[in-house]
Amino acid sequence: MFTNENQNNPSGYNSTKDIVQVTIAPDFLIKYNPSRKRVLQLIASGWSNASIAEDLSFSTKNIESITTMLIRIAKIHDAHGHLNPRARLVGKCLHAGKLKYLPSQEPPNELLSEDQTATLLLVSAGLSNKTIGKILSISEKTVESRLNNLFLQFGINAKANKIINPRLRLIAAANARQNITQEAFEIVWQRTNNVDLEQVVNNPADLKDAVMKIAAKLVEEAPRHRDNAANKQQQMQLAQRPYINPAHAPSLFNRLTQNQNPQQTARPQDLNQ
């Protein structure tokens, strides 16, 4: 498995909130080509072309060429502008079970609304803003406004587009923090994959109802998920504290005090008085 080990964004961008680690199965789509796997991995974690090029010491045009090749290998076709090709590529990898976002230690700070959750579900499936708007019966500008609010809630710097791709980073952060369950994603994916999206967009009522029902369920479960995430984070923090076995305390005390003057050193039993 390939792991994104570089925890620092290139080009001096520094944000601890939206760094995401991704693992990817080595036999998926791009066998025996580490550079292509690395490109796919960094795309999935939300890096821009410029950042990926810097990481691999390639030109930006080379990265664009590799990305285009990956999209073609993944058989992602869209003649009507219904898909966001890179987001769809990430969605297809996630659906195939060949891509995994490492869970974030940071639980979501703010709970999402049903409208935000529905938008995020469709973004994760790789649909374009225009298509999301038609499915949810809202304008494209409203979709953009919702995404901007989601960027703020997830701590994503949407203006750092030379360093990150905000839309892809949003997908990565949402999956890493498990705001969207795999089951919910699968339902939306099945409703938008291997179908005539033009027909779906022209008759969006069924998909809209399905997405809103999924969103309502996720919103209902969100407080419990947030509490569980916070408890896990607290447990991890406690586990990282130094622990001394009581049986080892006398020998540890002797080692720490062996070079001191015995007359000035407190005995172990005195420490309890």
Image: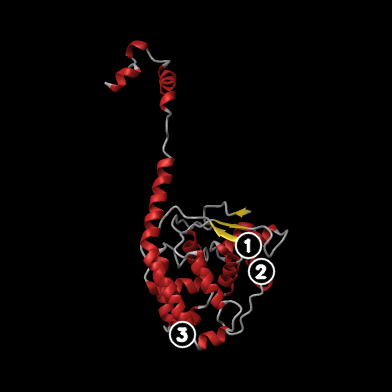
For label 3, the residue is 205
| Marks 1 & 2, CB-CB < 8 Å contact | yes
Residues under labels 1 and 2: Cα distance?
Answer: 9 Å
- Identify the disc placed on residue 70: 2
Q: Secondary structure at mark 1?
A: helix
Q: Local crowd at mark 1 within 10 Å, few (<14), some, or many (≥20)?
A: many
x 37%, y 55%: residue = 227
Estimate the x, y position of residue 7 in percent, counting from the top left: 52, 52
Q: Local crowd at mark 3 within 10 Å, few (<14), some, or many (≥20)?
A: some
x 57%, y 65%: residue = 94
Residues under labels 1 and 3: Cα distance?
Answer: 37 Å
For label 1, the residue is 39
Q: Quadrant of the C terminus?
A: top left
Q: Local crowd at mark 2 within 10 Å, few (<14), some, or many (≥20)?
A: many
90 left or right of 234?
right
The type of residue carrying mark 3 is Ala
| Marks 1 & 3, CB-CB < 8 Å contact | no
The type of residue carrying mark 2 is Leu
Q: Nearer the viewer, residue 73 or 219?
A: 219
Foreground mark, 1 or 3? 3
